[in-house]
Amino acid sequence: MCGGLRAQVLGGSKVLRTSMKRSRDERRLYHDLAWTWPIVSPPGRYVREAHAIHRLLRGRAPAARTLLHLGCGGGHLDMTFKRSFEITGVDISPAMLALARRLNPEVAYRVGDMRSIRLGRTFDAVVIADSIAYMRTQRDLRAAFTTAFVHLAPGGVFLTYVERTPATFRQNATTRAIARRGDVEVVLIENQHDPDPADTTYESTFIYLIRNRGRLRVETDRHRLGLFPLPIWRRLLRTTGFRVTQVVGEPDRPGAWGNATFVCVRPAIKRQGKG
């Protein structure tokens, strides 16, 4: 896979070999390989997750009308959210936002970093889904929470979730997805590895086997993500100013698997009584 650029013929199929880039954090999925995302992870796969998030939001803010989706990616969750909310989506990747706009032309999308963007308005609800995993330090995580907090109206609800913690991380966990659209078939292999358990990051490496009319192209991609114990999440949410009202599915024990979803509220402003 790390050989030079050259075409070979193996078993009658043309194979294009490409070199693995040396960067430690490439994220090609959000740049030149973004076009593969709707193929390997189609929007319909997110309907169930979106409904679950919707129920949790409505449980705390039944009248919520406006929603800020930070790290919205290709807009797959928004396809369902837009039926119930007026959405503003923010993502750092212009390539992903191009996909989101194509899928949800009625949604307002903005390019921005969830750690620093300021839109100058507030929303009834804020969601950060799996994109929160790209926060690799406590400072990053706190910054993302602060962005959610300053954009949330008093009494509004914020939802985010934890996919992995140090206790549940599985070294070299490897998954595979196979998908086809027209003449294009994509096999996506993902491997998760923590080279230094003493720090707060791990690596997710992707190998793409892309076949277009029998011609094979191999691409690689590497992402660095954050890994924090649940108590750190709780502490940072509270020090940001949130009141954590609900934690759904708390998988912070060895051998557990699944998400821990935090449902938080920005406390309402207390009215001063007349003296």
Image (spheres, rainbow, N blue to C red):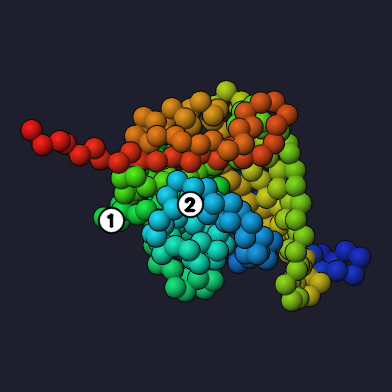
Which kind of residue does numbered mark 1 sit on?
Arg
Look at mark 2 in the image and give the residue it sits on. 58
Image coordinates of residue 6 in percent, x first then y, are: 74, 63
- Pick out the residue farthest to the front: 274
Residue visible at 51% across and 26% down in the picture: 231
Task: Residue type at mark 2: give it.
Answer: Arg
SS state under label 2? helix
User: Which of 113 and 21 lies nearest the eye of the viewer?
Assistant: 113
How far is mark 1 from mark 2, CA to CA? 21 Å
Q: Residues within 10 Å of mark 2 (few under 14, many from 20)?
A: few
Q: Residue furthest left?
A: 275
Residue at 77% x, 60% y is: 178
In screen coordinates, is 236 left or right of 258? left
Q: Is residue 90 visible?
A: no
The circle drawn on residue 235 is none
97 or 72, nearer to the observer: 72
Residue 227 in view here = yes
Q: Position of residue 147 (x, y in %)?
A: 36, 45
With respect to residue 154, does 47 lie above or below?
below
In the rendered image, residue 271, in percent from the top left (x then y), is placed at 20, 39
Residue identifier under label 1: 121
Q: Nearer the viewer, mark 1 or mark 2?
A: 2
Asked which secondary structure carries label 1, the reply is loop
Observer-nearest of 193 and 144: 144
Query: Horizontal placement of 187 versus 53: left or right?
Result: right
Quadrant in which residue 261 is drawn = top right
Q: Position of residue 168 (x, y in %)?
A: 66, 31
Query: Who's the residue at 36% across and 29% down the image?
Result: 239
Camera-side residue of 156 and 138: 156
Left or right placement of residue 179 versus residue 127 in this view: right
